[in-house]
Amino acid sequence: MGDHTLMKALLVCEYRQGKLLESTYELLAFAERLAAEKVMLLIGSESEAPNFSGKVYLADAGKYGEYNPDLHKRLVLDIVQKEHPDYIVLLHSSFGWDLAPRVAAALKASQVSEIVGVVDGRFEVPSCNAKMRRLLAPKTAQAVLTIQSGAFSYQGEARGTPQLERVDLAGITPLVEFIGYEAAEKKAVDLAKAEVVVSAGRGIGKKENVETITALARALGGELGATRPVVDSGWVEHTRQVGSSGQIVAPRLYVACGISGAIQHIAGMKKSDFIVAINKDKDAPIGEVANVLVVADVMQFVPALTARLKK
Amino acid sequence: MKMLVCIKQVPDMESRFRVNSEGVWYDEQDLAFRMNEYDEYAVEQAIRIKEQMGGAADITILSIGPDRVVEAIKKGLAMGGDRGVHIKDEHLYQKDPWQVASVIATFARDKNFDLVLTGLQSQDRGSAQVGVTVAELLGYACATTLVGFDLSGNVVTARRELEGGMRGIVKFNLPAVVTCQLGLNTPRYPTLPNIMKARQKELLSFPVTDFLSVESATTTERMYPPEKKGRGLVLEGDINETADKLVAILKEKTTVLR
């Protein structure tokens, strides 16, 4: 494992539709938090190599293309053999949570998912819809780690020119074939442009109550948003979903009505200038990002608030 | 067409959680348990495939855990599963995803399932590892985070949900493992006659020791509530007074009420 005190981390870049994703730099921030030696793998194009003064293994996108689990697994394993990293690190994303367990299974290594913190070399992860945390310790010499998007942010602008080393593997027959992308549904409403967004969560109870939340949005001159469960239940149309799989918003005022605060939702609204949450549960995770938490029955409180705003 | 649907029973996420006496998991007392939400989509998808094949398919619903998980298995049977498998384990919470996946793969290995379906992740542990690891252990094709599924002959064309609402289309042959994302379909509610019928369905039970042969790869050192950091103002009490206070705060701190 090289130096006995210095850990080594292999960081697997994210690349989609010909572009390096910005989130790649969160991997660098995490490795710095671990004070680990860093080496990167980019399955992409040379022109998109990350700004990083160190070794970057490059597998050509022309050949390996967009994300293919079997090919990407083999490429990661190839670099693991060359570099013997202590940690293999990916983002906890549709890419990372798909690829990481494949690598971990091949290495018979521990995997820790969705890391939000590091405490004495142990990894902190959320559980129970972010209401709890757990501290995990890998038992194997190597470990595969995925980090929560946004949990480790890179300070400043990344600089540096990587030392590229090309990798090429022959003779892999992938089990899964990538066909192409399908664009997101057209947005009927661009929530990102709204000054005020008032969102409904499952805590509003039923579809008929959406109108009450819409009335508050109107009284504030804003737009209606919703959480994923509300959208999946068909209470509000898909195009109004706020969160990592919907729209990312940062309005002047965000009002979360009956929203407990799943990570995916918080990722979509935490950058709002001012956040008000209305929830009957004082301990709901949404309280962590709210400037004001109103502990009340949302269907009683919202009409009272709307009535005052109309005056 | 033989299908295996792996489901977990989890607490209602609206619950208040307390740490257990070992300090590594939540205390189950006073919690209401239900089928993991993501797994409901997996059960529903299996039933739709069976319907598409005119009933020429067989669905096994598997769950690991203490006796309470039989309730979740029965719900799966009432939705349309054919047979239940309960792998009894009083200490499931002490197993890591590697062990859970290994138990499932060992159970499934000699049974020639064409398709294994499960949720993207559990709502309590949320590692999103088990389904993929089962596929790797069985040598099956695997696609995760599905919001679209189309089976034609032996070929699956599936839509994976990516970030920002974009989708990735993938194609693979059976046998395969798929993990289901919320919104893949609309899970049905079991009807009363189907709940009655489910009681007559086969329910097999095995001790977890029949299938467990690996050590855990990861140790949970402790569980704890998140640190309350940077918490804002908390308003409680009379609705009307609270609403007045909130309006005053919005006038002072934001520009939206001018």
Image (cartoon, rainbow, N blue to C red):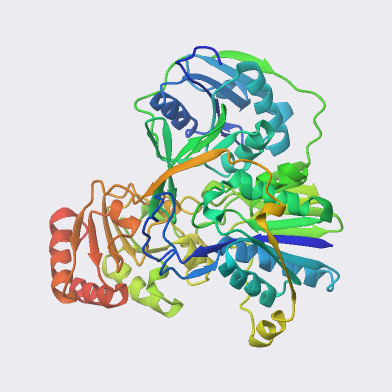
Q: Residue at x 22, y 72 (%)?
A: A305
From what the image shows, is residue B71 above or below residue B26? Answer: below
Horizontal side of residue B109 vs B192, given as left or right: right
Left or right relative to A47: residue B155: right
Point out the image quarter for the N terminus of chain B: bottom right
On the question of residue B186 being in view, the answer is: no
Q: Residue at x 63, y 14 (%)?
A: A165
Q: Note whether residue A99 is visible.
A: yes
Q: Horizontal and vertical percent for residue A169?
A: 75, 22
Question: Total label count?
Answer: 0
Image location of residue B196, percent across then percent down? 68, 85
Q: Nearer the viewer, residue A220 or B49?
A: B49
Figure quadrant of residue A129: bottom left
A299 or B42: nearer the viewer: B42
Q: Position of residue A233 (x, y in %)?
A: 52, 70
- Quadrant containing the C terminus of chain B is bottom left
Q: Is residue B222 left or right of residue A50?
A: left
User: In percent of the image, x 57 and y 63: which residue is there?
Assistant: B66
- As drawn, A137 above or below B147: above
Answer above or below: position of B60 versus B230. below
Image coordinates of residue B187 in percent, x first then y, are 62, 71
**Compared with residue A131, is residue B236 higher up or lower down, i.e. above or below?**
below
